[in-house]
Image (cartoon, rainbow, N blue to C red):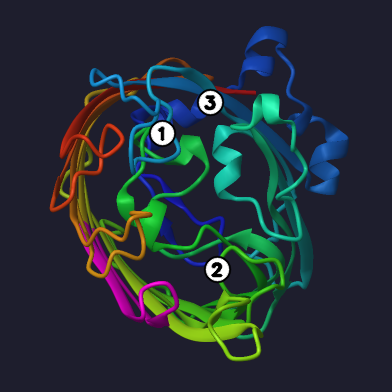
Amino acid sequence: MYINKKQNGWRLTLVSAILMSSAAHAEDKGLIESLTGSDINKTAPMRDLGLKFGGWVSGGIAGNPHDPRDKTNGPVTFNNRSNEFHMHQLYGYIEKAVDTESNKWDLGFRADVVYGVDAAYTTQANFDDNLVVDSSSRFYKLAFPQVYAELFAPIGNGLTTKVGHFYTIIGNEVVTAPDNFFFSHAYTMQYGEPFTHTGVLMSYPLTSNIELTGGVVSGWDSFFQQPANFLGGVTYTTDDEKTTLAVSYITGDTVVAERGDSVDGSKVERHRSMYSVVLYHDFTDELHYTLQHDLGVQDNVYQRGGDSKWYGVNQYLTYDVNDQLATGLRFEWFRDQDGTQVSAAGNKNHYFAITAGVNYSPLSWLMIRPEVRYDWVTGANEFDAGAASDQVLISADAIIRF
């Protein structure tokens, strides 16, 4: 089992067997170290400073037998360009992680940068949304999804405070490609959850089993352009670490319009809240299960003239065949009850998707993720530019870690 704890508060993510087994970790070399025999992170200056560099490049193709007229895979995003190969992430980061096991104050930081088609989903207005404006590369963006400082205070069981711009703690799937089992993403992540926040977030281990997280952020995917929201969560992990339950919650106002929604044309704020529950369980050392449920509500959505609600359930089942191969299934139901989250036409649909995939790592620095995905809707057509109620995607990507 691999648990990603980069965002202060447990984020449960399923990854390939090469990352989950202890044997794989012993030989977990990146491409540069494999080719040259040297690793900058293992040099004396880097160890003394506590610094770590890392990164990867990922690219793939989403084959769509429908060959949609608009060249997109409908409401499926991230890998939404049909029958085209794209570089999804050229990703790099530098960090100094705080030592949460010591009894001393410690200061750290992290900065991430990503270029590719995935970067468009993590850009922030008034921050990095206009760094790449060349129309010839309109699908490719440059983003800085994380830039934050971190402080560990030896108070009680240890209080960690993060200040800056960082990924959300909401939900299960994440932006960083190596930390997801599947190439494609669930509707809940795409349309029902924030990607990043800017603000302050604190985490505190109440006991060896319970961790609390809480803070104040500038809304969803906003760089100080949205009102203050509360973001928090609680995580419980059993003593044997085979079961983890994480509940996260965000609530506060959001600016939904600057004109046309008030008499004087001023900005109008509407209240929005959502929660996410993620349950992770190891049936055996090889067989892993994840259940996720999200629900979100927003008051008086401007374009629709009423309140909005969205919710859904995701299930993941993965099996580690050996240290190089893992198989997985994902089934999702997502309900856009009021047509505010997914469809530009306001379609009030039920969205379903079932995905079967494989993670294969023939080399320590290479991950290949083929998958077959079937999507369908009940209600108005959403695929093939509105001409079809379902679609099949046959996709694959490769991730090369530096």
Figure check: 117 above or below 219: above
Name the residue that disc number 3 marks: 28
1 vs 2, front mark: 1
Q: How many marks?
A: 3
Classify the position of the C terminus by image quarter: top right
Residue 1: x percent and y percent?
Answer: 34, 44
Helix, strand or loop at mark 3 = loop
Q: Residue at x 64, y 84 (%)?
A: 265
First in sequence: mark 3 vs mark 2? 3
Q: Which mark is residue 220?
A: 2
Residue 315: x percent and y percent?
Answer: 19, 51
Helix, strand or loop at mark 1 = loop
Along the line of sight, the residue nearer the viewer: 328 or 98 = 328
Along the line of sight, the residue nearer the viewer: 302 or 232 = 302
Q: State whether residue 301 appears in this view.
A: yes
Circle 2: is it few (<14), some (14-19), or many (20+) Cα within 10 Å? many
